[in-house]
Amino acid sequence: ILNVEQSPQSLHVQEGDSTNFTCSFPSSNFYALHWYRWETAKSPEALFVMTLNGDEKKKGRISATLNTKEGYSYLYIKGSQPEDSATYLCAFGGGGGKLIFGQGTELSVKP
Amino acid sequence: NAGVTQTPKFRVLKTGQSMTLLCAQDMNHEYMYWYRQDPGMGLRLIHYSVGEGTTAKGEVPDGYNVSRLKKQNFLLGLESAAPSQTSVYFCASRITGGAGYTFGSGTRLTVV
């Protein structure tokens, strides 16, 4: 059974704070690591897909890094805004076409 | 461009009834997936398909069957619904290669 762990489970920050979350995944049979943003009452939306050790991706104030050798990825949000409030999911792809999702980190940003 | 469309959006079933959830995508994606989302459990993969005519089991396949007779459609069937299948079901699709998933809007199923 593949284990994808995310921490923390939830996070409450003030507007303007920078924050980061962790995703841990198996370091063997790695194919891809995905990050998704999931707002309440909506569907998950893809943020990043990373495939190479050392990958860094950026979209506006959000960035992610990848370490496949030790099996972790970080997601950073710089200067959090209330509209960043959502659940952030990571998902591990070990090949074969399927993704295994972590339980998510729920971010709440207070104005 | 509709993306991924799930029908129905809501359904209430009695224990033992059967039903089929339909997922349709208009993006010519090869891969399609069915996940269920339960509180505290995240998204768990039920079944998936890597192409027309193919299906494979995911993490929690018991009690469900699937079919992918046409590339654009992926059907999820419950032969005899149980209260444990009360959940929100999400369909997703993607092209081959390194792209992210496109998700449908979900189907909220309650089994009483």
Image (spheres, coloured by chain):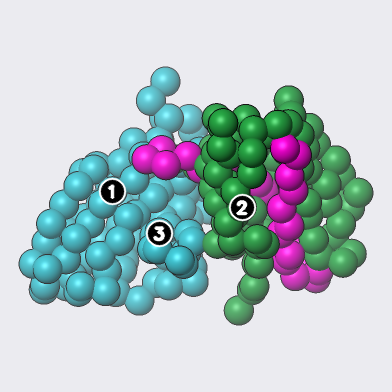
Whether the magenta-drawn stretch holds residue A38 is answered as yes
Residue topped by disc 3: B37
In the image, taking residue B24 as reference, residue B58 lies left or right, namely: right
Instruction: Answer whether labels 3 and 1 touch (C-beta < 8 Å).
Output: no
Residues tagged by mark 3 and mark 2 found on one chain of the structure: no
Q: Residue at image x 74%, y 48%? A: A20
Mark toward the viewer: 3 or 2: 2
| Separation of marks 3 and 2 at Cα, in angstroms | 21 Å
Q: Position of residue A19 (x, y in %)?
A: 73, 44
> Is A52 drawn above or below residue A56 in the view shown?
below
| Colour representing chain B | cyan
Residue topped by disc 1: B107
- Say the numbered circle drawn on residue A11: 2
Crowding at dot 3, Cα within 10 Å, few <14 / some 14-19 / many 20+, comes out as: some
> Is B55 drawn above or below residue B6 in the view shown?
below
Helix, strand or loop under label 2: strand
Mark toward the viewer: 1 or 2: 2
Q: Position of residue B74 (x, y in %)?
A: 36, 49
Front-lying residue, A69 or A74: A74
| Separation of marks 1 and 2 at Cα, in angstroms | 28 Å
Please state which amino acid type lies under the numbered disc 3: Gln
Provide the residue span drawn in magenta.
A17-42
Whether the magenta-drawn stretch holds residue B42 is answered as no
| Colour representing chain A | green
> Is A50 drawn above or below residue A4 in the view shown?
above
**Disc 2 chain ID:** A
Please state which amino acid type lies under the numbered disc 2: Leu
Residues tagged by mark 3 and mark 1 found on one chain of the structure: yes
